[in-house]
Every structure is written in structure tokens, then in C-alpha cells.
Amino acid sequence: MDSENKNFISKEMIGELKSFALEILITVVVVFFVISFVAQPTTVDGSSMNPTLHDKDQLIIEKVSERFVGYNRFDIVVFPYDKEEKKYYIKRIIGLPGEVVDIVDGQVLIDGAVLEEPMLVDVIVEMGSDLLPLEVPEGHYFVLGDNRNHSKDSRFSTVGFINGDEILGKGYIRLWPFSDFGLIE
């Protein structure tokens, strides 16, 4: 009778292990799906988005709205600058496809008109490219950091225009620090 109990327990344990393994597999698939297509965590590295975002802020970027409405001026987006090391830039969209972007007397001009920006930014000291004004190609964006004088962004040939297909998503929620928890604008 003891051997029957041992077999019964073994079959019961095997059933529990199969159930547990299935739960883990489902969890991994759901997490993979969410990170690949819906949202993913990221960390701000540096001061280029001050005062909006700060070094080491923890964010959630969402990947869904782009598929339905695209990106808009002033969206904060995340895109790779070193794909091998999985390092990302976080910048604000300023110029949209087909627009002409220029910087004159430290101010951004879009199609010849001064851009009225809803966030506080410094007057630009370093213009970047001497090729300005530039027309933003179709499917691309011109991005700037909010901390304009301490940001590597579309003004510089090392960054240039951002291909919309390379944007991972847009900043949605700041998780950390808790004192600044909330939607990102």
C-alpha cells in the first residue's frame, strides 16, 4: 500500500509541476508580448531632458499609440543610439516630416515661424549643424533635448533625423522617483 501512495503522490506532484510550468510559460509569453508591443521600462541617462526628466528617472514607454495616431510635436520619444549595448536617447519631437527646421538667434523656427514651446527651455547657444535650415524627410523626425545646451540631438550629425521606424515608443509614465510619479508631458 505504501508503494501505491508513493505512486499517487508522484503522479500528483508531476501534475502540479506541469501546471506550474504552464503558468510560468504563459507568464513569460505575456511579458514578452507586453514588452515587445505595448510598454517597456527605461531609465533616463543624463541631463539632456532637464527640467522635464532627470538622470536616473524610471519611465514606462508605451508603444501602442504610434500604431494608431503616430507621433506628434512635443512627444517625448525613446530611440536607440547604440543598439549593441542597448543604450537609448530620450528626446522631444520638434520637427515633423516635411517641415523645415531652423535655429535663429537661439530660437527654433518651424517653416519660418518661431516655435512656441509649452515647456521651459534655454536659448540655444550651440546651433549644431551649419546646414540649417533643414527639411525633415518623410518618415523622420527632428528631436531636441529640453536641456538644449547640454543635449546631443538632431542638431548634430551624430544623431541627425530620427527614423520613425526606429522609435521604440513614447514616454508615458514616470515611476521613479515616487515624488514625481505621474504622466509625462
Image (cartoon, rainbow, N blue to C red):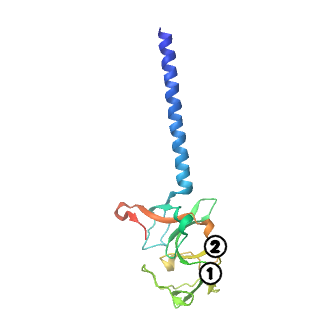
Q: Quadrant of residue 132?
A: bottom right
Rendering coords of residue 51 (x, y %): 42, 74
Closer to us: 39 or 155: 39
Closer to us: 135 or 85: 135
Q: Quadrant of residue 167?
A: bottom right
Amino acid type of the residue tagged 1 in the rendering: Gly
Q: Quadrant of residue 67?
A: bottom right
Rendering coords of residue 75 (x, y %): 50, 72
Amino acid type of the residue tagged 2 in the rendering: Gly
Identify the secondary structure beneath mark 2: loop
Observer able to see residue 5:
yes
Label 1: how many Cα within 10 Å (few below 14, some 14–19, many 20+): some
Rendering coords of residue 82 (x, y %): 62, 64
Closer to us: 119 or 126: 119
Residue hosting label 2: 139
Residue 18 vs 150, above or below: the answer is: above
At x 47%, y 14%, the residue is 5
Residue hosting label 1: 98
At x 61%, y 78%, the residue is 97
Name the N-terminal-most of marks 2 and 1: 1
Closer to us: 91 or 30: 30
Residue 48 vs 40, above or below: the answer is: below
